[in-house]
Structures are given as structure tokens and as C-alpha cells.
Image (tube, rainbow, N blue to C red):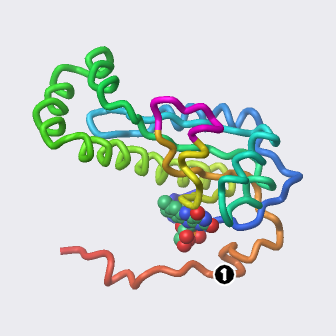
């Protein structure tokens, strides 16, 4: 499928078919896809947690506001978390990043303070979410990005010490009647000329 077709056909799924599960082989591919996510200076300040266990999904559903039914009915939820321990990150990058990248962090980012660094971590995680949504779309898997979660409860339930959950992405297969699919609810976007300029 051409990428433009994936962009047109992927959509935020609002209702999942609970009888359809993402296969183990697709989960294996998604693990590798997540590992390959790009990030600034290859910093990789993240953790991706994939939950397929029904009991655990139902616990997370209790911390997911209006998104709860998606967690109960969808196949797997992928939780995107950013590193929370800046000091540990600073130490660890000496082991896995080249000198130039460590220098970029120490000379340009570190002087801007912890808040800026954490925002920069979050930027990297959000980038991986966009990439992941496209990837699952290319595999014919439906998805829902969800900011509507209680991040601190997710952290506690999943034992994510040293990480801050930011967004969860539900994956699975749509209920045939899902009213948000593009055939029933055509995509709505700002005018192309307003948002994209070619100069
Ligand atoms: C970061 C992010 C967080 C979102 N959070 C939620 C959410 O909590 N629940 C939900 O149903 N949709 C959520 N959405 C879906 C958006 O509303 C949706 O992407 C947007 O309306 C465009 O529609 P489309 O994804 O179907 O093209 C989120 C999307 C993004 C990118």
C-alpha cells in the first residue's frame, strides 16, 4: 500500500471487536518497530510497555476515563513512557551514544534545566507515537492514541519506576459498526492550503 493510502485509511478507532486479537507474530514485529523508532541524537529516552493480558487491561481501563471500553474490548494496549530520571539518563548515555551526541546533550540541553530536558524527552516519545500509528496502519491493524489516561495510576499499575507514562495506544481490530471509520465519518482536516505551503 502506498503511504498516502495508509494516511487516508488509518483512523482513531472508537469501538473494537473483542473477538479479534493481534497475532503474536505481529506483536513481535511491533516490538522491533518500536525499538527502531528515531529520536534526536538517538537518545531513545523511553520505554514501551505492551499489555495483552485481559485482567491487566481491565485494571488500566479503570484509569482511562472515557477510553475504558477500548481497553476492555481492544486487543493490546501500548503504553508510551518517557524517562523520568534525568541523572540516570545523563550517566547512561556515556555508554551508548558517541562523544559528539553526549557533547550536544551536555552543552546545549543540560544548561537549559530539568524542565526543558523532560520536555525534550516527551518530544521524542510523541514522535515515536506518530511513527507507530503509521506502522500499525501499514499492517492493517486499527489503533487509538489516548492521552485520556491517568498517567500516575498507569505508572503504579505497570510498576514503571524511573519512567513517566505519557500516552497509551490501543491496537486491535474495529467493530464492523464503528461509527468513526472513514467510510462512516469522513476525515476532517484544516484546508490543505492553510496548513501546507510550498514556497
Ligand atoms: C496525542 C493524541 C492523543 C489523543 N487522545 C485521544 C483519546 O484519549 N481518546 C480518543 O478517542 N482519541 C484520542 N485522540 C484521537 C484524535 O482525536 C484523532 O487523532 C483526531 O481527531 C484525528 O482523527 P483520526 O485519527 O481519525 O484521523 C488522540 C490523538 C492524538 C494524536
Does the magenta portion include 113?
no
Residue placed most toward the observer, 151 or 67: 151
Q: Ligand 1: does it lie within 8 Å of the C-beta at label 1? A: no
Quarter the C terminus occupies: bottom left
Is the residue marked by circle 1 packed among few (<14), some (14-19), or many (20+) residues within 10 Å? few
Q: Is residue 110 visible?
A: yes
Q: Is residue 6 visible?
A: no
Query: Residue 67's spot in the image, x, y percent?
Result: 68, 62
Residue placed most toward the observer, 136 or 81: 81
Name the residue: 81% across, 65% down: 175
Residue 96 is drawn in which quadrant?
top left
Question: Is 55 on the left-hand or right-hand side of 45?
Answer: right
Question: Is 124 on the left-hand or right-hand side of 168?
Answer: left
Residue carrying label 1: 185
Residue placed most toward the observer, 67 or 8: 67
Query: Residue 196's spot in the image, x, y percent?
Result: 31, 75
Figure quadrant, ligand 1: bottom right
Quarter the N terminus occupies: bottom right
Q: Secondary structure at mark 1?
A: loop
Q: How many marks?
A: 1
Query: Residue 25's spot in the image, x, y percent?
Result: 72, 33
Name the residue: 66% across, 31% down: 28
Residue 105 is drawn in which quadrant?
top left
Report the magenta residues as a range.
155-163
Q: Residue lying at the far top in this picture: please name it.
A: 95
Query: Residue 41's spot in the image, x, y percent?
Result: 26, 34
Residue 38 is drawn in which quadrant?
top left
Amino acid at each position: 500500500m502506498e503511504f498516502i493510502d495508509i494516511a487516508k485509511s488509518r483512523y482513531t478507532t472508537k469501538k473494537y471487536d473483542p473477538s479479534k486479537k493481534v497475532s503474536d507474530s505481529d506483536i513481535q514485529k511491533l516490538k522491533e518497530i518500536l525499538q527502531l523508532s528515531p529520536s534526536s541524537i538517538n537518545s531513545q529516552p523511553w520505554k514501551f510497555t505492551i499489555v495483552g493480558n485481559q485482567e491487566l487491561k481491565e485494571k488500566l481501563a479503570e484509569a482511562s476515563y472515557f477510553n475504558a471500553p477500548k481497553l476492555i474490548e481492544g486487543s493490546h494496549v501500548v503504553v508510551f513512557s518517557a524517562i523520568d530520571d534525568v541523572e540516570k539518563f545523563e550517566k547512561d548515555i556515556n555508554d551508548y551514544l558517541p562523544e559528539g551526541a553526549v557533547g550536544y546533550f551536555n552543552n546545549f540541553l543540560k544548561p537549559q534545566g530539568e524542565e526543558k530536558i523532560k520536555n525534550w524527552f516527551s518530544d521524542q516519545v510523541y514522535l515515536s507515537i506518530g511513527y507507530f500509528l503509521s506502522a500499525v496502519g501499514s499492517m492493517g491493524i486499527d489503533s487509538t492514541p489516548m492521552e485520556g489516561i491517568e498517567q500516575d495510576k498507569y505508572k503504579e499499575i505497570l510498576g514503571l519506576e524511573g519512567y513517566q507514562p505519557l500516552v497509551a495506544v490501543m491496537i486491535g481490530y474495529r467493530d464492523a459498526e464503528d461509527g468513526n471509520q472513514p467510510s462512516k465519518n469522513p476525515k476532517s482536516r484544516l484546508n490543505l492550503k492553510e496548513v501546507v505551503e510550498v514556497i
